[in-house]
Image: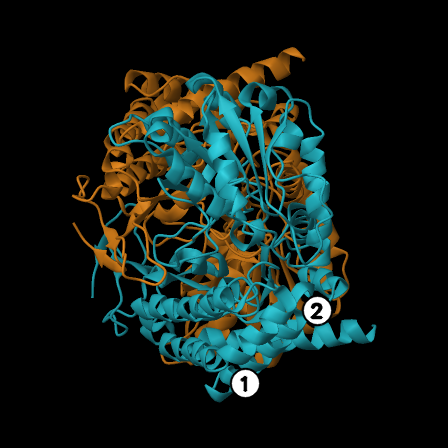
Chain colours: A orange, B cyan
């Protein structure tokens, strides 16, 4: 074995031991670990933001906000496990008179084991070392090995130090959390038999390659990947007429936010044909200057993507120029426009995500044409409707709900609230699973059900003991019972 | 396109249309469809059992019981959707004062779309045309295309006729249910873009081949496969001493039930070394004669499996003979015995499932050796402990819960209750998912979450409307609220 392989084997062995200890720990203990990590990150916010800014150029204000979002997320998961529904405790008492007789059966969700987390470039805190995947896996009693993103390596290492120290001080088992870096190490991690699930946020090609590895293992494991999303926005004629300026300003703000490097960036905007909206948007986009990109690679890919769209027939540039040599220092916004008929003719390149501050207006002639193009849009994280009160958009909403995990009304998709109802995930390639990676139910990705039949109380998890010592919601003989 | 391809395309197109209609139907409507199917099957039980018995030779009593189990299952899913928790309705009200302001967000689970179901050989009703996969998919609003098992083709066709007629009479949309047959058609079905998930019960090689197809599609889809299981049983020294005869009789009954063609058949039985249990079991197994096998293929594979085990070093035959030419008419029970040390040396063939009336006793010297062998046992549907009251088996139970989805105490795994707490699934290769294929929560396999942000009441599913018109349990602002 190479040194790298030996190191990884030592890490996964420690992660396996730690996962056993974490699974045996109480919810209160694990909630304490999450709070300790959150507190430690908050205490070091100034230093962390400075490192992050030097590596990502996302700016102090945005990064400070992202730390708060990240620590809020850790604390939300502490609340989630304390509440207890996440265990999905179910008790069916024995029924000896049934035909055939029914045994006593008690079911709950247990942690799946060591989890690999691949962090994202664009959220160096919230979708990175101590981000949502890590927090939700730790919350339910899994250990975590994070593959650092090369775009913010120093930040990853410093964050990992703080997390490791905080966990140790809070009494968490050794090996519960570790950081690795490098593409080869990441590939080996996904294939390591000790790893029982993978969380990933990144590109379609990178994500699909790891997905393919995860499912082709001798023992396939779940791969929770968030890969790519076009986030279609539909504006009705009535809405456009009523609030053109507001919509143009909102859209300009949303597609350029973070230099368009959000997984929820509105990449396709459907507008009625023959309006002056493109000009309004061009005006609104003027105020948005060039902004720094996250990595050299992303900065290089952006102009390639622009030129690919610009070279297509019947595509107009509404604002900006496709002929730019974006560097890490400055990628300028570009708005394209085309017709729905044109997308129907050559959908491939027009319905491809371009990471950066660009969006494509698609003019539709009528509802039928709109619906025909929407039917070609790949699975997305979000879909948005701008309509006027009283308009019947139920058919449109039904279609959008079929292609996205979150359907928004009269807003912009770039904000993702961290709460109980959030769904950050959608049909492939938005994600590769039927779960969310943001919000309370993200924990379900790292749990597996186990039922105990006719078990003595002494071996049962407290959640399944008759007296409900944890005081959590449970389903008993088919009836949901609150504590 | 070939005729077969054209036929499949027509079926999946109809299934797509029907899935839209079913998703829009009310829970009460869909519950009505399930009841109609259950009632129709019950009404035709005599005819169905006669066809089933002629094809499977499982006997009238067993098959009549299985019809009751199947119709009970359909009615349980009607109860599940009527109760409403399956929608996982969550409402987070807007919080404009939060930083950043939080929108109104409402989440529920929606049906995933058309589902392919591959039926099993060994349960011609309960895991077949109108079995658990079909029932749970229909319950939540999916359409279903079943691939018939070649072992009971006439029964599949007749069952499908009854199901189709019952659904039509109950007002279900056309195309909601269809049956296909043939290996090529099944392969094409898994690859058809209209299909959004697959349910499968069968062998490891067959299931893995279809799993590989499902995950290598341009749009990968979830494959819920139940593939193979050894179902280890551990008997402690105290239990063996206290009730040898009872354990031998129970085990003999369990491993020969249905000629050992149960996915939950106890295939490995761990006993303390140096007891007289093997002789007791041989005595108990004497009463179990040769029994018919389900198909020619299974009958052919059984003696091959027996000879493979018998040829291994340090394996003893306790009862029966490995040198039998099993035919569909009669496969005779065989009990093997070996030492834990031997399994540690050559685990591969000893830890391989052999479908049919055979089991392997494994004598362990101490807890350490027992634990070492258990660490090599592949993922299983069940694991069983026989211990005496007061014995500390917590470490053993923890290990068994790590390798199986259901842990039984002082019973036998071959019965699978259909209720809210059931877990029929386990680590690979027992299943390929984190869900159950039996019991109430089986529905979650065919649902995907969608969140609605700042949506007007008029476009919301009734489950998410403020007044809770369906009267179902929901989580509101983080708090679980009963109707």
Query: Residue A84: x and y, percent?
Result: 26, 43
CA neighbours of label 1 inside 10 A, class few (<14), some (14 to 19), many (20+): some
Q: Does residue A62 show up?
A: no
Q: In this orientation, does residue A41 appear?
A: yes
The foreground one among B292 and B119 is B292
Expressed as whole percent of the image width and height from the top left, the position of residue B380 reads: 51, 40
Q: Which mark is residue B165?
A: 1
In the current view of this chain or complex, which residue is farthest to the right?
B2
Q: Residue at x 42, y 29 (%)?
A: B399
Task: Please state the horizontal and vertical placement of residue B328, each as a whole percent of the image.
Answer: 69, 58
Query: Which of the 4 quarters of the picture holds residue B467?
Result: bottom left
Q: Is residue B187 left or right of residue A3?
A: right
Q: Quadrant of residue B183?
A: bottom right
Residue A344: percent from left, percent from top: 70, 70
Which element type, helix, strand or loop, lies under badge 2? Answer: loop
* Horizontal side, residue A475 vs residue B32: left or right: left
Compared with A437, B473 (above or below) is: below
What is the crowding at mark 2: few (fewer than 14 residues within 10 Å), some, or many (at least 20)? some
Residue B88 located left or right of residue B332: left
Rendered position, A253 above or below A190 = below
Q: Is residue B16 above or below residue A56?
A: below
Q: Are marks 2 and 1 on the same chain?
A: yes
Q: Chain of mark 1?
A: B
| Residue at left offset 30%, top offset 53% | B102
Name the quarter where the N terminus of chain A is drawn. Answer: top right
Marker disc for residue B294: none
Disc 2: which residue: B181
Relative side of B95 to B188, left or right? left
Considering depth in this image, is A417 or A319 the residue closer to the camera?
A: A417
Report the front residue among B237 and B261: B237
Residue B430 found in image quarter: top right
Q: Secondary structure at mark 1?
A: helix
């Amino acid at each position: 074995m190479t040194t790298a392989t030996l190191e990884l084997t030592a890490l996964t062995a420690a992660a396996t031991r730690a996962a056993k200890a974490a699974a045996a720990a109480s919810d209160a203990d694990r909630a304490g670990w999450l709070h300790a990590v959150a507190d430690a990150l908050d205490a070091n916010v100034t230093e962390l933001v400075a490192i992050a800014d030097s590596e990502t150029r996302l700016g102090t204000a945005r990064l400070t906000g992202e730390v708060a979002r990240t620590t809020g997320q850790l604390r939300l998961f502490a609340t989630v496990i304390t509440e207890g529904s996440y265990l999905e405790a179910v008790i069916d008492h024995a029924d000896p008179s049934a035909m055939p007789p029914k045994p006593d059966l008690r079911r709950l969700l247990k942690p799946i084991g060591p989890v690999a987390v691949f962090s994202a470039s664009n959220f160096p805190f919230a979708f990175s070392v101590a981000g949502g995947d890590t927090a939700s896996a730790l919350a339910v009693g899994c250990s975590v090995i994070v593959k650092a993103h090369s775009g913010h390596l120093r930040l990853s290492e410093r964050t990992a130090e703080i997390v490791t120290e905080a966990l140790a001080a809070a009494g968490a088992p050794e090996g519960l959390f570790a950081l690795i870096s490098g593409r080869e190490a990441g590939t080996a991690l996904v294939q390591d038999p000790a790893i029982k699930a993978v969380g990933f946020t990144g590109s379609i090609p990178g994500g699909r390659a790891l997905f393919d590895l995860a499912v082709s293992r001798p023992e396939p494991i779940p791969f929770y990947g968030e890969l790519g999303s076009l986030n279609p926005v539909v504006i009705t004629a009535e809405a456009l007429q009523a609030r053109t300026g507001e919509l143009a300003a909102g859209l300009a703000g949303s597609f350029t936010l973070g230099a368009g490097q959000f997984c929820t960036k509105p990449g396709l905007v459907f507008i009625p044909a023959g309006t002056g909206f493109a000009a309004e948007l061009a005006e609104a986009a003027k105020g948005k200057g060039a902004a720094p990109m996250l990595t050299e690679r992303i900065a290089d890919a952006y102009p390639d993507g622009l030129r690919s769209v610009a070279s297509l027939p019947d595509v107009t540039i509404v604002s900006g120029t496709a002929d730019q040599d974006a560097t890490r220092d400055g990628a300028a916004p570009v708005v394209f426009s085309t017709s729905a008929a044109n997308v129907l003719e050559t959908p491939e390149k027009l319905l491809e995500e371009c990471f950066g501050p660009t969006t494509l207006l698609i003019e539709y002639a009528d509802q039928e044409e709109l619906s025909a193009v929407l039917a070609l849009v790949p699975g997305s994280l979000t879909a948005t409707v701008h309509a006027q009160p009283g308009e019947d958009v139920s058919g449109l909403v039904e279609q959008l709900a079929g292609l996205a995990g979150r359907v928004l009304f009269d807003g912009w998709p770039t904000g993702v609230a961290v709460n109980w109802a959030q769904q950050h995930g959608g049909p492939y390639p938005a994600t590769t699973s039927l779960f969310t990676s943001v919000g309370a139910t993200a924990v379900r990705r790292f749990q597996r059900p186990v039922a105990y039949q006719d078990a003595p109380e002494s071996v049962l998890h407290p959640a399944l003991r008759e007296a409900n010592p944890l005081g959590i919601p449970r389903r008993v003989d088919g009836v949901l019972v609150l504590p």
